[in-house]
Amino acid sequence: MTLSIGIDVGSGVIKTALFREEEGNSEWLARYDARIRQRDAYQLVEESIDEVTRQAGLKRGDIHYIATTGEGENVKSATGHFYSMTTHARGALYLNPEARAVLDIGALNGRAINMDERGKVLNYRMTSQCASGSGQFLENIARYLGISQDEIGELSQQSTNPEPVSSICAVLAETDVINMVSRSIPPSDILRGIHESMADRLAKLLKAIGAQGVVMMTGGLALDTGLVKAMQDSLAKHKMAATIASHPDSLFAGAIGAALWGGFRYEKLKERGLLPKAS
């Protein structure tokens, strides 16, 4: 039996998952997500570890492996670190065993990842850092429109006349939105226009890596129902042989993958007599 914790340190949110591996079965025991805001990210990581162990009725000393991913490479209490593409691929496969590609959209960029049936990354593409297709960009737009992030998806799907957003630069795209508001364009049409613009660029990423079959959306924007619908429409428009899927726990995909890879690495090290010990 192996107990492992996966911690996905993002730009805006820290996601943590605790798993138990026993006789080939993976059991998800606890999860926790915390927005960083103005707080110390490393302190928040320690609090997240305490929270998931508390939820599972465990102590830190019971944990065999603590794995980080994302921006968590320098977390001192971690046993090991994994690249985020490998953890998102493994996490997506856990959430949907049919998935053969991942579309991870975080606070600052988006990534399209091709993988095989074992979760092995085959190839990938990323959006540029200046692209407006990110969670931070949508968060800024929501703030400007005076709505909460939770309202974005539903409002977007109420659109009857989407307003196109042509710029791929976040700064210029925000200027476009300000102009739209001054022209009394309804928020629903603005949001749908943004979603269509993002979906078109993300669909091109998926096409570039040759994605086929089920594409699992991960990251914070995987729960944006307006973006999910725009992605489904965009793949149909581009006549791609792929379908978009999301999951209520898509936010935790990176943390899930880190925990599962951490458990796997622990077992391999155990076989060699080189057991690590989480601090």
Image (tube, helix red, strand yellow):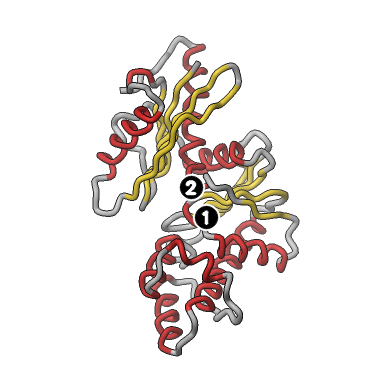
Q: Secondary structure at mark 1?
A: helix
Quarter placement of the C terminus: top left
The local crowd at label 1, few if under 14, some if 14 to 19, many if 20 or more residues have their Cα within 10 Å, is: some
Which circle marks residue 78 in the picture?
Answer: none
Label pair 2/1, CB-CB below 8 angstroms:
yes
Q: Which amino acid type corresponds to the residue marked 1 in the rendered image?
A: Leu
In the picture, measured across the screen, residue 257 lies left or right of residue 55, that is right
Q: Which amino acid type corresponds to the residue marked 2 in the rendered image?
A: Leu
The local crowd at label 2, few if under 14, some if 14 to 19, many if 20 or more residues have their Cα within 10 Å, is: many
Extreme residue in the top direction? 273
Q: Earlier in the sequence, mark 2 or mark 1?
A: 1
Which circle marks residue 223 in the picture?
Answer: 1
Residue 42, horizontal then vertical, whole percent: 27, 40
Q: Nearer the viewer, residue 271 or 180?
A: 180
Residue at (56, 37) in percent of width and height: 90
Q: Which residue is mark 2?
A: 251
Residue 242, horizontal then vertical, whole percent: 71, 54
Rounded to the nearest angstrom, the CA distance separating label 2 from label 1 is 8 Å
Q: Nearer the viewer, residue 160 or 89?
A: 160
Q: Is residue 15 above or below residue 222?
A: above
Residue at (43, 63) in percent of width and height: 149
